[in-house]
Amino acid sequence: MNKKIYLLLLIFCISIHIKAQQTPAAKQSQSVLILNATAHLGNGKIIENSAIGFVNGKISLVADATLIRLAKDAYDITIDASGKHVYPGFIAPNSTLGLVEIDAIKSSDDEGEIGVMKPHIRSIIAYTADSKVIETVRPNGILMAQITPREGRIAGTSSIVQLDAWNWEDAVIKENDGIHVNFPSTFKRSGSWFEPGGIEANKDYKKQVSELNAFLSDAKAYLGTASKDRNLVLEATKGLFDGTQTLFINANEEKQIMDAVQFAKDNGIKKMVIVGGYEAYKTAELLQKNNISVLLRRVHEMPLKEDDDIDLPFKSAKLLSDKGVLVGLENSGSMERMNTRNLPFLAGTCVAYGMQKEEALKLITSNTAKILGIDAQCGTLEQGKDATLFISEGDALDMRTNKLTNAFIQGRSISLETHQTKLNDRYKSKYNQK
Amino acid sequence: MKKTVLLIVLSFLLTKTYAQEYFPNNESIPNKTMNFTAFTNARIYVTPTQVIEKGTLLIQNGKVIAAGTTVEIPKNCTTINLDGKSIYPSFIDLYTSFGVEKPKRNMERNPMYDTKRTGYYWNESIRSEVNAFENFAYDQAKAEELLKAGFGVVGTHVQDGIARGSGTLIALNNFDASKQLLSDRVSNHFGFTKSATTNQAYPSSLMGMMALLRQMYFDLDWYKKGNSATKDLSLEALTNNEKLVQIFATEDKLNSLRAAKIAKEFGLNYVLKGSGNEFERLDEIKKTNSRFIIPINFPVAYDVSDPNQADQMELKDLRFWNQAPTNLKVLSDNGIIFALTTDKLKKIEDFRTNLLKAIKYGFDKTKALEALTTIPAAILGKSDQMGTLKIGSLANFVVTSGEIFDEKTTLYENWVQGNKYVVNDITSKDVRGTYDLTINNEKFIWKIDGEVAAPKSDISTKDSKKVKSKLTISDNWLSTVIKSNDTTKTTFTRLIGYIDNTENLLGKAILPDGTETKWSAVKTSPFVKTVEAIKTEDQFKIMPTTFPNVAYGNTKKLEAQTMLFKNATVWTNEKEGILQETDVLIKNGKIAAIGKNISDASATIVDAKGKHLTSGIIDEHSHIAISNGVNEGGHNSSAEVTIQDVVNSEDINIYRDLAGGVTISQLLHGSANPIGGRSAIVKWKWGASPEEMLYKDQPGFIKFALGENVKQANWGITNPTRFPQTRMGVEQVFIDYFQRAKEYDLAWKKYNTSGKKGKAPRVDLDLQTIAEILNSERFISCHSYVQSEILMLMNVADKFNFKVNTFTHILEGYKVADKMKAHGVGASTFSDWWAYKFEVNDAIPFNGPIMHNAGLVVAYNSDDAEMSRRLNQEAAKAVKYGDVSEEEAWKFVTLNPAKLLRIDNKVGSIKVGKDGDVVLWNNNPLSIYAKAEKTVIEGVVYYDSKKDEENRVTIAKERNDLISQLLQEKNKGMITQEPKKTEKVEYHCDTMEE
């Protein structure tokens, strides 16, 4: 009984704490022109003295300010961004933003449903648009995310959102964009709780892969007939076969990745992406040949093997890109939600380890948009696309200089305040009271 | 009832002739003999170095009477002519669990804090009262395995717990039970494993075990002096066992160093039972001056034929397979005294195979014999009774066909206390070879190979068709069963014959229809040991041992250089600020000069134009490079434990940290309990030993913790059982401990100042450490999150009149920065972590800057192996979020942590006279684009990006070479094992070991 009361109290406390603090911005009513900034288009190009205009949420102008002539009042608002930088909004794929508020508190955790094959589980309905974590990632330039369910062999279906919305319906950029598979691992841990063993070959690997195969061939067979008995689980995979959904396969080992590629081919999957890809660099040619892109696991991590190059995670994106594989960066792992705000610096590290800056920028903008299938709408600063972009005082890929002054999502000027900035203001003023 | 009587009668009947003299005898006439047995014409190894050619060994009543060339043979003597044969003292294995069972594991998972035993030590892993003999049952079958391998005497004990009690010495006498027990208490055992019988939470870590042992020895001393009001059978047993050989099972090279450390502290002399990896830390192992017991369970080759699986193997494991057989040679060449053991072998019969392998890899045969005879006897203090064939020794010896460590040699007999155990019949004729076999006019080819006493039969027809057959030899009678070639029926032809002439075998055959006829076999070619022939060539190239012996290890111990960095941008962290185009000279491990146009003829010049030179990064809060447990969470206070005991010099993360410019870390205990353990401040001297890594004359630090971890808030529903469960309880834990420590300290001061009269107080390592805090001899680094508890600890400290040195994590420090300033405490925080648990809900990335602006000493730490190597970037976040100047932000990860650790007099800035701990960066060190090119500690370059590139090439090549060796091994038909690797555990504050 006591415990129940305690629990209720706890939930009560949390819900007070979790109330949204930033009000979503209203629809763009006035046209905006950003002048003289260095524009990083996200497609590899830079315009030094740029003119970026947007109207009704869409980009209407991307030009070299020194080469065009604009009528004085062509735009309602002009922002002089001399010396500053403009970027397309960064995209965080394979994210659980809004699915968990506080890692350690189970009652705030909606990231993984129980079960094995569950393509019908949809992340979007659990997405808390007013999560306090979300507002802290925007001031570093992360303006969109793919909200992805976890756990199980088939984890479920993701959706892509923009990060300034009253609720999940308003947040959607693309609903049910992909299905996420955790491919069987070729290795597993052995031993028991009192005598932990080592890591050894997973003897059930073949069996587990064939179960996955069986599930998809079942689905295909089911979808091919007009059955009266509906199977909602199998039905949820429909998009994989007609090309409207992407199959995201989490795989890190070389063999796993190669088997995953074959698996997708065998099952007639139209569009497949490798997520994780620790050893993807070893299979780069296969991936490139089959037009399979990679959402590369957290750059800021340790090598998984002692003998690996100590900077392997730092340079993996370059190794893959150099071989012609389309790469985006994802950041799943420990404390992943709050860590989302460090996404730009993952790209920055790729620069330190050999990539060109504008190429590294693609890893969190246009490449990701292509991989997620939203590149017609976002990912670069190009005419006709969503005006989801931001202005930074300096190079946004380096923490030394990543300082946002303005950010826009679909043309709406969003707040860069957070509960954290409020606490900052509050306590700075506390010490000024004396 | 009747059955019992029958049994008693039976047991009398079964009593052997040689029963002890005062035992009742059920034979009609006592058949006691005083006969002698003489073994003549043998080569006799009286000791490994004293050999008699064509000598006589005379024994009587299980003892050696004489050994020599002129031994007079008494009349009542049986003489055995061993012409051409050799006699060796049989082997002794000090470390077995022969005849004793390991206790059953307690499967209760809910931890218990107090013991349920009465009359014994407070910790259930101290089981010194256990005596192996009390639950000993002679294991006839196991004894046979050991006898076959040449052993005559074994020490056995219960391999369970930290203090394991006394061991028993047993003669492997399968004939006379009354003589098996040589000594019921011969050794006293220790090990680094918790008892399987207990679910007591303490100790949960290796450092806890170290501390427990120390406390145990202090308690022992105190108890012996009659200070205890209660009876403690564990301590009494320890006292009784004090004179015995003290054997400590360490099972690892670094653990051997740890056990030796305890031995040194308490003036003990442990014989260390190692694991076979001693060669990897040879110098340190040698310096322990300990004697060792070494197992020879060399790893079986890994099956790497699947490249995907092979890829998963770590170089260190591949390399260990390659190097392990050299361990004995290396130890022996370096004068380390050790005995050998069969421990950890899957099968006892592997002992000989592995020992021969070690000999093939250079281990001296005489040393091998010593390690099995005279050395174990000497360790036991029983050199006059066993291990040699000197007069008066046990008549324990083996009879062999030749040199005992020769592959071709056959072990015939193993005599224990004058009783013969036959391994291979010495009279057996060797029928091996190829014969033309004729049965009833039908011709076959008969190939006999295998062992002399256990030959294998291979029969084929003239047109090379195999015929199934089975051959057995007993007392020189040969019998063979041959399956008929007719596949429709199961019928047999049987051969029998007495072996007289091995060139020409003959005898009686019984055909499938029952008719009897003759058979004969004429030898056409002699036996050749084909498999063995290949084996002698399988010596692989041995890979060099590196320091540490893992990937990226150094091929030799590194040395300090005089280095001159020219034209660098120098971040001094001193009032000079950031100097452009400046030279820095490092000499004798110190910063010798800073300025323009410095020259030094002896210096290695480093062109640093366009590059940045800083002092090394200092991580105030790290948990890398720790062996077996970062938390001793079994008690509310574990002030008695110290990370200094468990620094793991072999951790690859040290090298990775260096590559991120980190030169010093404070390795902190975890945060599972309010009063954690003591810290180790280390310099990352990659390749050095754990002791060498410890920062010299380091100030004492201890971890404290507050909040969710200590109140077990995130431990699930069933586990929380330990007080405190709230922050309210945490305060009381502190007050209680500090009060007790104060009283403890007073009691000792009183005792010491009163000329040590009366009863000495009990040494309590826990309270003693806490008293050091009260006396400002030890400093607290306290894991903390929310403002209430931060204020609480400062209040407690004020009450007890000391200062909290550092709040670590301190995510709500910004809320009470003014009060922290008033208290005089520093802050070591994360740049931007939050949202991982409830208590970090108000954590903000502006925390560091606010505290900094309030005048606190602020550091950014990692608490994470990965983040540790990017602390330079974390410092940049103070610039990003709080507009701290770059120069000040850089101090967050260098000078400020040095101040918090009270080592800023020697490190933390580039200043003449300070330690030469510097990092050369290719870019502004705060930038995401910066990479460390060289990391230098005291003038030694421990990381060099160019050398790192070379390392990668070497690693790839060595892996490839080793994999090719393994493939050769598999092709030879050797047994292989599945690729497997150990899992690396990265520790955080709240990592609890099971």
Image: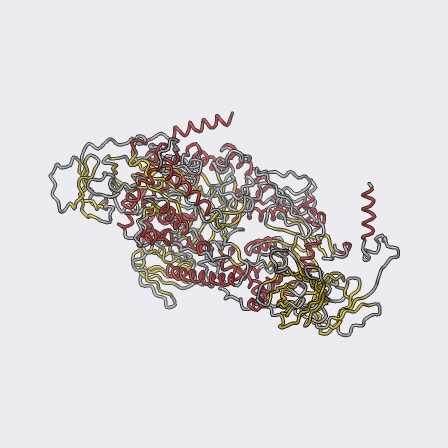
Above or below, comparing residue B738 to residue B897 in the picture: above
Instruction: Name the one closer to the observer, B775 or B303.
Output: B303
Q: Quadrant of residue B746?
A: top right
Give percent across and percent down for residue B83.
73, 72
- Which quarter shows the C terminus of chain B? top right
Above or below, comparing residue B75 to residue A28 in the picture: below
- Looking at the rendered structure, the number of numbered marks drawn on it comes to 0
Q: Quadrant of residue B519?
A: bottom right
Give percent across and percent down for residue B271.
63, 57
Q: Is residue A401 left or right of residue B208?
A: left
Q: Is residue B895 left or right of residue A6?
A: left
Give percent across and percent down for residue A344.
31, 45
Instruction: Name the one closer to the observer, A339 or B428.
Output: B428
Give percent across and percent down for residue A283.
36, 53
Q: Is residue A342 left or right of residue B391?
A: left
Q: Residue at x 41, y 55 (%)?
A: A308
Q: Residue at x 27, y 45 (%)?
A: A366
Instruction: Name the one closer to the observer, A263 or B346.
Output: A263
- Residue A374 visible somewhere in the drawing: yes
- Which quarter shows the N terminus of chain B? top right
Instruction: Name the one closer to the observer, B627 or B964.
Output: B964
Above or below, comparing residue A409 to residue B321 in the picture: above
- Residue B87 visible somewhere in the drawing: no
